[in-house]
Image: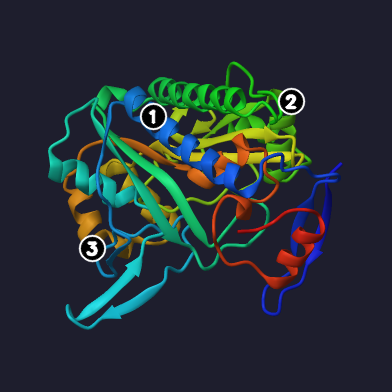
């Protein structure tokens, strides 16, 4: 059984680190790097074909005063700095949800078409553990919708397509590297509303609910993340200006977004693979800004264009590149498949457990 070790950095609060017993990474460093390249090439190609996406170049920074950067749960602070040559501040992106929507409009994509990009972000407020790093690398994708596709049924269809790519890639990796644990992702992904998940496990926290349902089902898409549940709290926080989490989809259910999670036996916990959803339209944007107490954002460049109906209706999300490499290569720490910065005590504890961070 994996064991959890509390870590105490010089400035950070305690963080749990999961150290699997008798850990065997099975592939050496060179084989690991080759595996990462194989996974990224195969997954990217399959995702683009499945969702009809075109690869585009994306920024690593955006102007601070446009509202284009994403604040994720609404509280993270981006890395901000001054650019002397242009006379104003810029921010390192935290994700590209809003930028992608602007790009779809600028490039003239039609319904049924979309884009994807390599997104590299810095999230300095992230709590570090086996699954979380200040450096985020993911495939960010976005696709244009028709008004009739703003529905739970269409959302779930896109999730099924993405999950099919994930499962096919797992099987290809295991065939290429037989020393890895055999494929274990289930054939189908289970769909469950956040409200129903809370009712199913009323005495558990949201993270504990995720662990419980993923242990049971293997792969789950939790629908409706961001709106308050019966206890007055959301399953998880979401910013007001990208995913639509307020639209009522059936009695007692809200939200056109969600998370793809799988059970990860190496760590004995749920692993989030993707946060995604149908994006806000003009009406849901204003309602969510009001709920969050952020009506002042309606005056920003991006929000004005969206409220005026100048941007296409879209669905989109991010798929963690390092998370997927970690999953497919059966690694115990995301630092085994990406080069980042970690607390010294975490590096030491990992090394003592046979986990070598890059």
Q: Disc 1 vs disc 3: which is toward the camera?
A: 1
Mark 1 lies on residue: 47
Mark 3 lies on residue: 299
Report the front residue among 99 and 147. Answer: 99
Dot 3: what SS?
A: helix
Residue shown at the point (34%, 39%) measured from the top left: 141
Report the front residue among 199 and 38. Answer: 38
| Mark with earlier residue (1, 3) | 1
Dot 2 alpha-carbon crowd within 10 angstroms: few under 14, some 14 to 19, many 20 or more: few
Residue shown at the point (44%, 46%) measured from the top left: 138
Query: Image height check: is 59 above or below 348?
Result: above
Dot 1 alpha-carbon crowd within 10 angstroms: few under 14, some 14 to 19, many 20 or more: many
Labelled pair 2, 1 in contact (Cβ < 8 Å): no
Mark 2 lies on residue: 216
| Mark with earlier residue (2, 3) | 2
Residue 314 in the figure: left or right of residue 220: left
Query: Image height check: is 224 above or below 166?
Result: below
Residue 56 in the figure: left or right of residue 353: left
| Mark with earlier residue (2, 1) | 1
| Residue 191 on image: x %, y % | 57, 24
Residue shown at the point (52%, 26%) measured from the top left: 169
The residues bearing labels 2 and 3 have C-alpha atoms spaced at a distance of 45 Å
Mark on residue 134? none
* Residue 188: quadrant of the picture: top right
């Amino acid at each position: 059984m994996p064991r959890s070790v509390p870590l105490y950095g010089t400035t950070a609060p305690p963080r749990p680190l999961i150290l699997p017993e008798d850990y065997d990474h099975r592939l050496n460093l060179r084989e690991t790097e080759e595996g990462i390249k194989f996974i990224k090439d195969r997954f990217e190609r399959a995702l683009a074909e499945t969702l009809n996406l075109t690869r585009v170049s994306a920024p690593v920074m955006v102007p601070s005063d446009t509202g284009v950067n994403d604040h994720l749960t609404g509280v993270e602070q981006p890395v901000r700095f001054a650019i002397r040559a242009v006379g104003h501040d810029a921010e390192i992106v935290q994700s590209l949800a809003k930028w992608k929507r602007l790009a779809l409009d600028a490039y003239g994509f039609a319904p049924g078409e979309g884009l994807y990009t390599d997104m590299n972000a810095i999230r300095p407020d992230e709590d570090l553990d086996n699954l979380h790093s200040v450096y985020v690398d993911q495939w960010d994708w976005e696709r244009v919708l028709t008004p009739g596709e703003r529905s739970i049924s269409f959302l779930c269809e896109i999730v099924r397509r993405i999950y099919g790519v994930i499962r096919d890639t797992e099987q290809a990796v295991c065939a290429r590297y037989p020393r890895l644990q055999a494929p274990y992702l289930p054939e189908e992904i289970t769909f469950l509303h956040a409200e129903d998940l809370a009712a199913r496990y009323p005495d558990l926290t949201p993270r504990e609910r995720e662990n419980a349902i993923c242990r049971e089902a293997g792969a789950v898409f939790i629908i409706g993340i961001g709106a308050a549940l019966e206890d007055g709290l959301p399953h998880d926080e979401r910013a007001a200006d990208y995913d639509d989490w307020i639209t009522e989809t059936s009695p007692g259910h809200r939200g056109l977004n969600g998370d793809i999670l799988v059970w990860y036996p190496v760590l004995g916990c749920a692993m989030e693979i993707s946060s995604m959803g149908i994006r806000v339209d003009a009406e849901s944007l204003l309602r969510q800004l009001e709920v969050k107490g952020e009506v002042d954002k309606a005056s920003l460049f991006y929000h004005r264009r969206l409220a005026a109906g100048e941007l296409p209706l879209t669905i989109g999300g991010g798929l963690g590149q390092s998370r997927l490499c970690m999953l497919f290569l059966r690694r115990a720490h995301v630092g085994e498949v990406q080069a980042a910065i970690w607390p010294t005590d975490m590096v030491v504890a990992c090394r003592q457990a046979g986990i070598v961070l890059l």
